Image (cartoon, grey):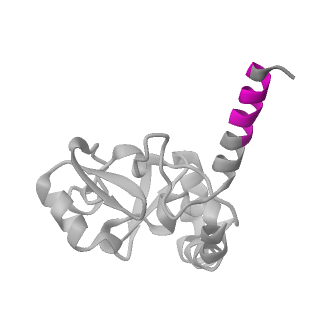
Amino acid sequence: MNRRHTILSLLVATLLTTSLTAGPVNTNWRGLAIKGYDPVAYSTDGKPVEGSAEMTFEWEGAKWRFASAEHRDAFAKEPARYAPQFGGYCAWAVSQGYTADIDPEAWKIVDGKLYLNYSPKIQEKWVQDIPGNIAKAEANWPKLREK
């Protein structure tokens, strides 16, 4: 096996291992939570808003971006209030026993908590039984978070 093949094999193995591990917060390749969207805006603006690279806060091993200093400061004061449930992984996937990435545009606030889904199509499944899916996801999340 030549050196180039060995390096490529190690890189692929590392990527596969990393992608199968659910961290406490779902981040993209740049370490951004919610793909750089402002978690506070979902509650205050009622819509997804992209955060600014100049307005960031580090929490739970992830970099969170915000549209304003007010949003950043609100999050810094009470991150659990604004952070998406299940570490920002797809709420439907967690209810089914696995983790999946999200689309920041597929979201819903239920009882003051932010839930994200993989896509609008998956969200259609999730909203058919929100209380049941939340209960299943809450039961599954501790095991998934440990992996």
Left or right relative to 23: residue 21: right
Q: Quadrant of residue 111?
A: bottom left
Q: Quadrant of residue 136?
A: bottom right
Closest to the observer, 84 or 1: 1
Q: Is residue 34 above or below residue 132?
A: above
Q: Position of residue 140 (x, y in %)?
A: 65, 74
Q: Position of residue 60 (x, y in %)?
A: 41, 65
Count the numbered circles shown.
0
The span shown in magenta is: 4-13
Q: Is residue 97 above or below residue 52?
A: below
Instruction: Check the picture and name the quadrant holding the C terminus.
Output: bottom right
Q: What type of secondary structure mainly makes up the magenta span?
A: helix
Name the residue located 61 percent from the left edge and 53 percent from the top edge.
Answer: 100
Instruction: Check the picture and name the quadrant holding the N terminus.
Output: top right
Closest to the observer, 36 or 48: 36
Q: Quadrant of residue 143?
A: bottom right
Name the residue located 58 percent from the left edge and 65 percent from the top edge.
Answer: 128
Q: Is residue 119 above or below residue 91?
A: above
Name the residue located 58 percent from the left edge and 70 percent from the top edge.
Answer: 129
Left or right relative to 44: residue 34: right
Q: Is residue 27 above or below residue 97?
A: above
- Outermost residue on the left side: it is 70
Closest to the observer, 145 or 85: 145
Name the residue located 69 percent from the left edge and 52 percent from the top edge.
Answer: 20
> Is residue 70 a member of the stretch shown in magenta?
no
Q: Position of residue 74 (x, y in %)?
A: 18, 67
- Outermost residue on the right side: it is 1
Q: Position of residue 96 (x, y in %)?
A: 69, 65
